[in-house]
Image (spheres, helix red, strand yellow):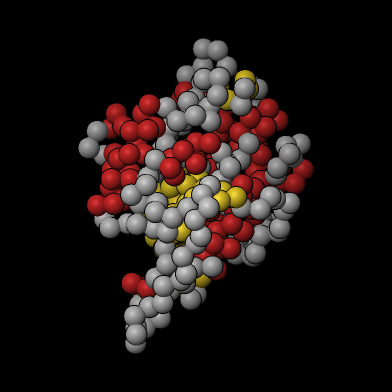
Amino acid sequence: ARASTRAMARPIPRRRPEPVTSATRPASTPGASGARCDDLSFMPVISLVRHAQASFGSVDYDVLSELGHRQAALLDAALAARGVAVQIVRCGSLRRQLDTALACPLAARGPVVRDPRWDEYDSADVMTHHAAVGAQVDGGGIGAPAGMTSQDFQGMLDGALLDWIAAGDRTPCQESWPAFRGRATGALQELAAGLGSGEDALVFSSGGTIAALAAALLDAPDTVFVALNKVAVNTSVAKVMVGRTGLRLLSYNEHTHLEHDRALMSFR
């Protein structure tokens, strides 16, 4: 039976979150005097941002492309225009996640704290053990076999992910699907528990991590993760509201900052 996504995640060995700057986290800001604690304006919101386009097919995938830098700048401007100026900022240990966070100085005002629980699943490991055709891995990058289109590669990845999920803890991969989902939900729950009234947070993560969280928050079957993952646009935003009754998914894959030019949209 599928493990409950509502349960607290099992702790896994991890290194302590590492701040990028020496600035300290600001104290929680209390709500206005007399304000109702269930007032939506005082409910914390966590915005989960997928990293900007990385360098698919290159020697090092974990580097933002030229388009990726444009996407991040557009996201930052759009968030700032909405009045977003968040002091609590998180990202995983991956370079593409950190570089996206640092490219959003107007919206991400606080120090960026790195926590590997926000990292993506190891796509190379999953493809190696669960794909019909092994992935090519070179210098930390992952690419399609010679002559394979990005669309064909996506189909191969989807099949590998479904097989990885079905394998559960029996997978030969270093990290199983239950462990991946557990560390992601654990990171989200811990972040949510530490937010005060009216305190928001920005998290710069990856498509698979955010898709896994969205599926969990919707209490959807694990396989829904694959469908959500394949449509995640680079620098898209998912919003999670922190209420007294738990966490609620408000939106997923929002990318209006790119809609004026579809050439700006990418999925890697």
On screen, residue 82 versus residue 254, left or right, reads left
Residue visible at 47% across and 69% down?
27
On screen, residue 156 versus residue 179, left or right, reads left
Q: Give the quadrant of the N terminus.
A: bottom right
| Residue 194 percent across, percent down from the top left | 54, 68
Query: Viewer-proximal residue, 112 or 76?
Result: 112
Inspect this view and state whether residue 138 appears.
yes
| Residue 169 percent across, percent down from the top left | 75, 46
Q: Quick one: which residue is furthest to the top in this view?
A: 147
Residue visible at 56% across and 38% down?
94
| Residue 212 percent across, percent down from the top left | 55, 49
| Residue 154 percent across, percent down from the top left | 51, 29
Q: Quick one: which residue is furthest to the left in this view?
A: 260
Residue 84 to residue 167: above or below: below
Residue 71 to residue 256: above or below: above
Q: How many marks?
A: 0
Residue visible at 35% across and 51% down?
107
Q: Quick one: which residue is furthest to the bottom in this view?
A: 34
The image quadrant that residue 142 belongs to is: top right
Inspect this view and state whether residue 249 appears.
no
Query: Viewer-proximal residue, 209 or 223?
Result: 209
Query: Viewer-proximal residue, 132 or 258?
Result: 258
Residue visible at 55% across and 34% down?
158
The image quadrant that residue 216 belongs to is: bottom right
Q: Quick one: which residue is furthest to the front in this view?
A: 22
